[in-house]
Image: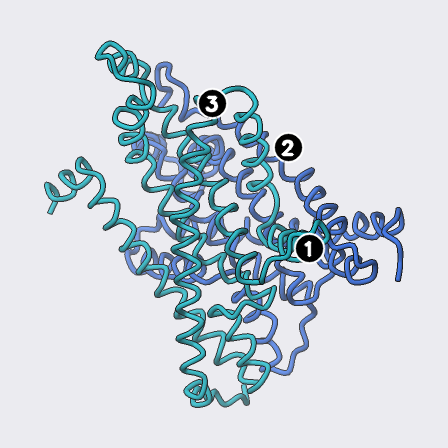
Amino acid sequence: MEYNFQFGVLANYLPEFFGGLGLTLFLSFAGIFGGLGLGIACAIISVRGPLFPRAVVRIYVEIMRNTPMLVQIFVIFFGLPSLGVRLSPFTSVLVAIVLNNGGYIAEIVRAGIESIHPSQIEAAESLGLTRGQTMRFVILPPALERVMTPIISQSVLLMLATSLVSAVGVEDLTGVAMIASSETFRTMEIYLVIAVIYICLNFIFRILLNAVGLIVFKRSRQRFLGRV
Amino acid sequence: MREFGNAEVLFIVFALQWTLTLTALAFFGGGIAGIAVALLRISRSRYIRLAVSGYIQVVQGTPLLVLMFLCYYAPSLFGIELNALFAAGIALTLNASAFLGAIWESALRAIPKAQWESAEALALPQSKVLRFVIAPQAVRIALPSTVGYLVQIVKETSLASIIGFVEITRAGQLVSNATFEPMKAYVCVALLYFLICFPLSRFSQWLETRSPGRTKGPSRG
């Protein structure tokens, strides 16, 4: 191989890369927590709600899970203006990421809720708890705790998927890399460095989200501390 | 300017063959490499296990889009011009090998140790133990997640559009540029993905309800 790797040119783009990293982190966290909120709401509707909202949620979840996120971004960014809704590239990808993650989380949380034994709900009823209280204090905490691992995996995959926003010109980490590589022609160097950054983010997100899980859920924390 | 009519819809539908070609490439390529990954992950040597686990972490930790750019541009360093189909196929294969490898590794690990030991007690060589005793049971465990991952691959082929390969997403882009009807073009694309992915997802869920892990009855292990 005759190629000389020159990583030096990357230094000129340092501010842009940090900006891109910031945007990737922002989109990831917004997507993870926004999607978590939306997903939990949808999961509750899909096990408890009246028929019509339940059908709407079902359709939403199936569309999100069975079409590529790239196409979802294109529909929202390029398609919606013809219906009179004009969003900036940044807003449209934010909406797409939250909606996409919401669909996946809804399905995960629904499985968690359905895994709670009916006797728990009967016990809550016999204590005179309202339906809302039962959901809030009896069903959701153990349900979410049970599906913590798949939620974390999904969140890390979402973080990696935020790289797709570069397709509509949003300058996240990948977007900045695309610009830098077209200006310097140091394509390999740039994408190798970007790949390493994403791999590091992958580990950081896993550790961080597991820590959040341990802080939120008392029983997981006790089990974890018991092992240490 | 062109109208969005039957010809445009047909153009997108015909591009489906390339989405399916890419899916097949990734699934079979990734499947073969995934078997290797899964087997090496249960190898007796600690170093092999560590090396393969490193491979899984690296591939799973790199966004597919970045992996695709690397596969597209890397061969040109050696003076080889790789077309978009092969670049995308290689990137998807690498990606699928890591995820399928991880799925199948856990299926292999789910087989009770007694199965390995009793097969060995019958003096079966290692390869036959895998082939006749372990694999048939592991396949039943792994099938639902494998079909589920196939849905993932179909959706991931859409990223090939970014390096210029004309599958249905890129076809949708072309139609949208020619007709100025992005909503119709992309909804048409989304609908096609849905028509492929939804039945597969349902099939995967159905397999899961009748997989051995889920049955509440007496265990067959």
Disc 3 residue crowd, few under 14, some 14–19, many 20+, Cα 10 Å? some
Is A8 rendered above or below residue A34?
below
Chain containing the residue with disc 2: B
Q: CA distance from mark 1 to mark 3?
A: 32 Å
Q: Identify the residue position indicated by label 2 in the image.
A: B199
Mark number displayed over residue A49: 3
- Which chain is blue in the rendering? B
Disc 1 residue crowd, few under 14, some 14–19, many 20+, Cα 10 Å? some
Chain containing the residue with disc 1: A
Disc 2 residue crowd, few under 14, some 14–19, many 20+, Cα 10 Å? few
Residue A109 image offset from top left, x and y in percent: 40, 34
Question: In the image, what residue occupies the spot 30% across and 16% down?
Answer: A121
Q: In terms of image quadrants, where is residue A137? A: top left
Q: Earlier in the sequence, mark 1 or mark 3?
A: 3
Is A225 rendered above or below residue B123?
below
- Which chain is cyan in the rendering? A
Q: Identify the residue position indicated by label 1 in the image.
A: A81
Residue B149 horizontal side relative to residue A148, left or right: right
Q: Amino acid type of disc 3?
A: Gly
Pointer 1 and pointer 3 on the same chain: yes
